Image (tube, grey):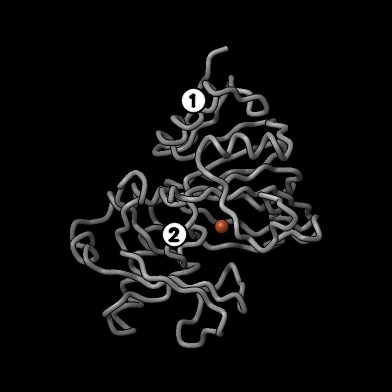
Amino acid sequence: MSIHAKPLSSSFGVEIIGLDPRNLDAEGKEAVKLLFDNHHFLLFRNAGVDEDQHLNIVKAIGPISGGDALMKDGKQFTYISNVHTDGRLPNGELFYHSDHMFLAKPLKGISLYSIEAPRQGGETRFFNAAAAYQGLPASLKERIKDLSARHVYDYSVNRGDKRPDAEHLSDNADTYIHPLVWHHPESGTPLLFLSRLFTTDIIGLDKKESDELLDQLLDYVDSRGDDYVHKWEAGDLIIWDNLHLQHARNDFPAGERRALRRVPIALAA
Ligand SMILES: [Fe+2]
């Protein structure tokens, strides 16, 4: 059977049909890498990948990112889960973001494999940060072209639906400043790089100006309406470019079980 890539949205994302993610040879890995580079988001339904098979397909895209405190005993994955005792982010809404945008080198990509899916809610939403940049009105493109923004993760607050308070950060907050128009470190594609979850302020502007410009840009992102919303089914395997796309999570009812195996992908050194 030949490989078929079925589009999921107008500007990114495909469902891959005809390629078994459990059994990838060198040619299959090359195909996965090419599809990822072209579409930035891959979905395999009924993937049935065990831990080793999951890691194997992710390595077609890039090296596994280490250094996660929950990756104990040589594990190269974690759980986003309210089922596993060591699960992270067990419940609640998560605003749009790219993982680790508050570090010098955010993740290149993320893969999630659905072990248990909620019957209602808990969808993961995605938007195309490259298309968002291209679609900006010319005046806004000009306004932000030389500006940078600060991104923060405050480990003491740890809320997915609240922007960090830049004036009251705890001692263990990570912060990093990136250009508002950041070029993807591997592809060079310009990206609109700010998020409601992590971005606190724009460097060189006073608080009022910074808040107004951030609100204008974030409202623009929310108004675009070209998101892809993934309704999870058990067995779904997705891999996406964490920089080209941003992701968010819808809330889901207490009592629903939701468990995903997460493998993080690092940027090339
Ligand atoms: Fe995330």
Q: Is residue 231 left or right of residue 120?
A: left
Amino acid type, callout 2: Lys
- Residue 130 vertical placement versus 36 (above, below): below
Q: Which secondary structure, mark 1? A: helix
Q: Which residue: 44% across, 30% down?
A: 34
Look at 50% across and 62% down and name the residue there: 100
Whether 174 is drawn above or below 190: the answer is below
Relative image position of residue 177 (x, y in whole percent): 37, 70
Quadrant where the image shows the N terminus:
top right
Quadrant of the rendered image containing residue 155: bottom right
Q: In percent of the image, x 57 and y 35: which residue is there?
A: 43
Three-letter code for the amino acid on which mark 1 is drawn: Ala
Within the image, what quadrant is residue 192 found in? bottom left
Q: How crowded is the residue under tag 1: few (<14 C-alpha within 10 Å), some, or many (20+)?
A: some
Q: Tell me the residue that label 2 is attached to.
A: 105
Position of 156 with respect to 27 (left or right) is right
| Residue located beneath label 1 in the image | 31
Viewed as shown, does residue 199 lie left or right of 58? left
Label 2: element kind:
loop
Which x, y percent locates residue 114? Answer: 70, 43
Judged by depth in the image, the label closer to the viewer, 1 or 2, is 2
**Which of disc 2 and disc 1 is earlier in sequence?**
1
Residue in the picture at 31% in, 47% down: 189
